[in-house]
Structure formats: C-alpha cells, structure tokens
Image (spheres, rainbow, N blue to C red):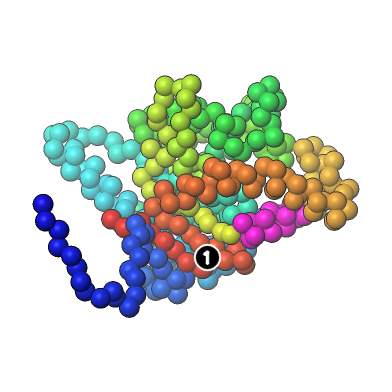
Amino acid sequence: MRYKINKMSKQPYEVTYSPFRSFSRDEWSKLEEHPMFPVSDIDVTKLQALNEPLTIQEIEDIYLPMVRLLQIHITHYRNLHNERDQFFDNTSRRMPYIIGIAGSVAAGKSTTARVLQKLLSMTPENPKVELITTDGFLYPNAELERRGIFNKKGFPESYDAKQLVSFLSAVKSGREVLEAPVYSHLYYDVMPNRVQVIERPDILIVEGINILQVTINKKSRHKVFVSDFFDFSIYVDATEKDLRKWYVERFKKLQETAFQKPESYFHRYASYSEEELVEFANKIWNEINLPNLRQNILPTRFRADLILEKGESHFVRGVRIRKI
C-alpha cells in the first residue's frame, strides 16, 4: 500500500468539526417568522418557576423557533407512522411523541418544560401535551434512608429506574391510561396516595436531571435506558458559577415562602439568618448538587438533540442543535 505525502502548506485557520450546529441568540431568533402565533395570550407568570425570569421576548426569540423545529420533527414522526401503516397494510394508533428535558438543579428545566407544553398545545394541530417530572420516581425518603443514600438524593441510584422505564415502556406500548407517582417539594418526599393520571397524550414531556444517564447497573440484566424512549431530547446548560448562584438565590426565596409553612420539610430553616441560610445552601450544593452535576448530569449533555446555553441572567444566549 502506498501513501501520498501532502506537501501543501497549512491553512491559516483550523476547521473544528462537531456533531452540533451552533447559533447565537440573534441567529436563532431569526430562523422562523411567527407573526400569527398568539403570544400575547400567554400568561408568563403561570409558566416560570420560582426565581426564574421569563419574558414574552424570551418566548419569541428562543421558544417559538424551538417549537417550529419540534413541529418539523413531529410531522416526520407522524408521516413515518402513516407510511408504516401503509407498508403493513393496517391501521394502528400512533404512539405519543416523547420529549426529554435534562439539566442541572436550578438550570431552569421546569420553566422550559412548561413553556414547551403550553406552546406545543397552541399549535394548529391542537395536540394533547402532558408533562411529568422524574421526581415522582425517586425512592421515598424512608427507602433512601434504609439504603443509606439519603444524602445522594437526586443521584441516579436514588431513582426507581425500573419503575420509570416500565412507565415509559407502557407509554410507547399504547396503554391508554397511565399513573405516574407525584413528588411534593413541600414535604420533600414522594406522596404515597397521590398519582398523576396520563391519558392518551399526543406529546409527553419528561423533565428530570438524570434522564440522559446511561450508566449500567452491573447487578441488573436490564440494558434499557430512560433516554431510549425519547424521540427528542433537550439539555438546559449553564456554568457552574451561575447554577450555584441561582440555587442559593432560590433557596433564599423559598425561605420567604414555602419554608414558612409548618408542614414544610425545611421549616426548621425558616428562622435562619441570611448568613446561616446561604452557608447551608452552599453546603448542600457542594456536597450533593455539584458532585451530581459533575459525575452524572454534565457528562450527558452532548447526548441531547438540542442544548440551550443560558447566560448569567437566566436567559438563553445560544443554542446547539445536533446535525442530521
């Protein structure tokens, strides 16, 4: 075998290849015109989470182009279903389109999930869009204590992955009525007698910090992951510095609101001074959230189909979309 030696001089720049296309906020906002979308009818106060700013401008610049992109993917999904029915010469019910939303604690996943649920339900097809969070699939506090992993709440091992995979498998198998467990942030635990009923959605949004995780439990024979059921996945990204700041700010806000309720799990911290509270919030971040981010969450970022890159003010400054 002969090899040809390239004697051409080097280019004055180096081309960097990536599986993603990157867009600045301004470039992304200009991708799709949406003059007819009834944005003015949206009450942003019902969509934003605690201490997470949301504006109509953010919806127009970031979320409407994203919804248009999702419409393209969903349309192809529907067309594929119809073509398969023609191929097999039968008529079948289309399975729900599942969108996964991942990212760190305090990144703003819940706001992204609610905004997409609202906007997708307002598209011309008027799809039924349901939203669940994986918090409900955490083991109850008593079980976490029994396993000795209460201080790792939110880590992959703190979730009943088998139950979550079974739930998503049932969704993709066409089961008409499903029940998802419900988590209470007030009680900081799974509610034993409450369920969320999911009935034949067209689109299901699944939000959770570790949903793109693919670590295999050596003791388990199952090699199926939560992300195997996603038709599209989104990762909400931000710097460690900003995530920490947002987490501490949210903790301070919660002290003024939810912590004041006697039934709150964190009621004992309602009387903390600001200095004590900030110290405690940083302790939780350093011992639980930051290790989980570095070990389990951040490494899954590039498994997503779309990455929202947030700036320090919580607004999106750039978008990455996987090439196809």
Q: Is residue 178 visible?
A: no
Residue 91 position, x and y percent, is 21, 35
At x 35% / y 60%, what residue is drawn? 18
Question: Which residue occupies the foreground of this view, 228 or 194?
Answer: 228
Q: Please, what secondary structure does the residue beneath circle 1 have?
A: strand
Image-based side of 291 in relation to 25, left or right: right
**Type of residue at label 1?**
Val
Toward the left, the furthest residue is: 1
Looking at the rendered image, the quarter that the C terminus falls into is bottom left
Q: Where is residue 174? Give x, y as percent.
A: 35, 31
Q: Is residue 137 magenta?
A: no
Dividing the picture into quadrants, the one containing residue 31 is bottom left
Question: Considering only vertical position in the picture, is 242 above or below 197?
Answer: below
Majority secondary structure of magenta residues: helix
Label 1, residues with CA under 10 Å away: few <14, some 14-19, many ≥20: many
Marker count (numbered): 1
The residue at which mark 1 appears reads as: 316
Taking the spot 19% from the left edge, 39% from the top edge, the residue there is 84
Query: Image point 51% across, 30% down: which residue?
Result: 161
Q: Is residue 148 above or below residue 70?
A: above
The answer to whether one can see residue 11 in this image is: yes
- Residue at (34% x, 75% y) in the render: 13
Q: Is residue 83 left or right of residue 303?
A: left
Provide residue 284's location: percent of width, then percent of height: 72, 45
Q: 290 or 212: which is nearer to us?
A: 290
Q: Residue 53: image x %, image y %?
A: 62, 63
Seen in the image, is 90 located left or right of residue 253?
Answer: left
| Residue placed most toward the observer, 257 or 14 | 14
Q: Which residues are magenta?
A: 240-254
